[in-house]
Amino acid sequence: MKYIQQPAPAPFSWTRALWLRIRTLWFLKMIGTVTGIAVFFAVYFWTMEETGGRAITMPVTWIDQRIGVNEFAFIPYVSLWVYVSLAPAFALNAGALRAYATGALAIALLGIAFFWLFPTVTPPFGVDWSQVPMLRLLKESDASGNAFPSLHVAFAMYSAYVISSQLRSIRSPRWARAFNWLWCLAIVYSTLATRQHVFIDVAGGILVACLGRSVAWSPLGRAFHRRPHLPQSMVRS
């Protein structure tokens, strides 16, 4: 009697597990992310235009005075829109995607509520933006309103929390998780180095991110706590 030798199980690969997550519901994730960002920007700029006349100027702290203007901070600043798309792209299933969206929606709604009720702007800083071309482009496209809390920081921190959980669940190496947090911190730094926000805005953004995280990690977001079921061929010995 002949026996057919079974192929050896494939070794565990966190990159393979990540790719499988990206492929899951990819069209829904893409449409949802693009639509969500577009709707957010429409409401964001409308709110800034409607409340600009009664906005107050945010105070400058010693931390703001210690951090100088950095033209190259423009790069991590605009990279946020790539970074925030990773968390939904890495969602394991529809439940995890809904939980992520719930937390993101909580952040957006709280931020817009602050912008409407307590409109703020960043101080002029006295910088000659013609000397920093990349930042001049940023200043021309995004005015200094809707300063507190910094939703740039809030969404970066919230994404970092979610991506960190996702990377742990597929047993990614430490360098991948460290890179995730370094990217987040670079975005947070960029909000100060581009003079789009002051430190108090950043602190407010971190608090809003914590709120969004608590919503996503609530019973509505328990899918984030679940480890994906990995076949034996993908489990480390």
Image (tube, rainbow, N blue to C red):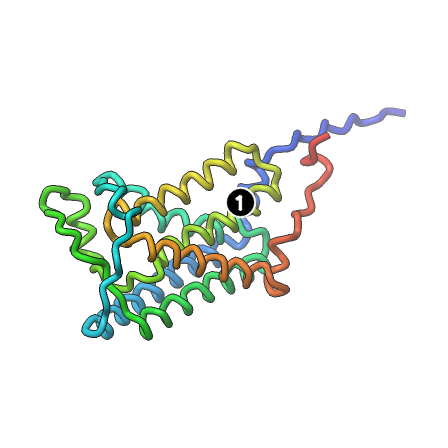
Residue drawn where x is 43% and y is 55% of the image: 206
Give how far across and how far down residue 148 sits, in percent.
32, 62
Q: Secondary structure at mark 1?
A: helix
Q: Picture coordinates of residue 67 (x, y %)?
A: 27, 42
Q: Residue at x 29, y 61 (%)?
A: 147
Quarter of the image where one finds residue 60: bottom left
Task: Name the residue nearer the viewer: 198 or 223.
Answer: 198
**Extreme-right residue of the structure:** 1
Whether residue 98 sits left or right of residue 8 in the image: it is: left
Q: Residue at the spot x=60%, y=65% of the render?
A: 220
Quadrant in the rendering for residue 9: top right
Task: Tell me the crowding category of disc 1: few under 14, some 14 to 19, or many 20 or more residues within 10 angstroms, Cα based.
Answer: some
Quarter in which the C terminus is drawn: top right
Q: Is residue 126 above or below residue 44?
A: above
Residue 171 appears at what percent x and percent y? Answer: 61, 38
Residue, disc 1: 164
Q: Is residue 181 above or below residue 48?
A: above
From the viewer's side, name the closer residue of 25 and 228: 228
195 up-or-down from 43: above or below: above
Q: Residue 160 location, x and y as percent?
A: 47, 48
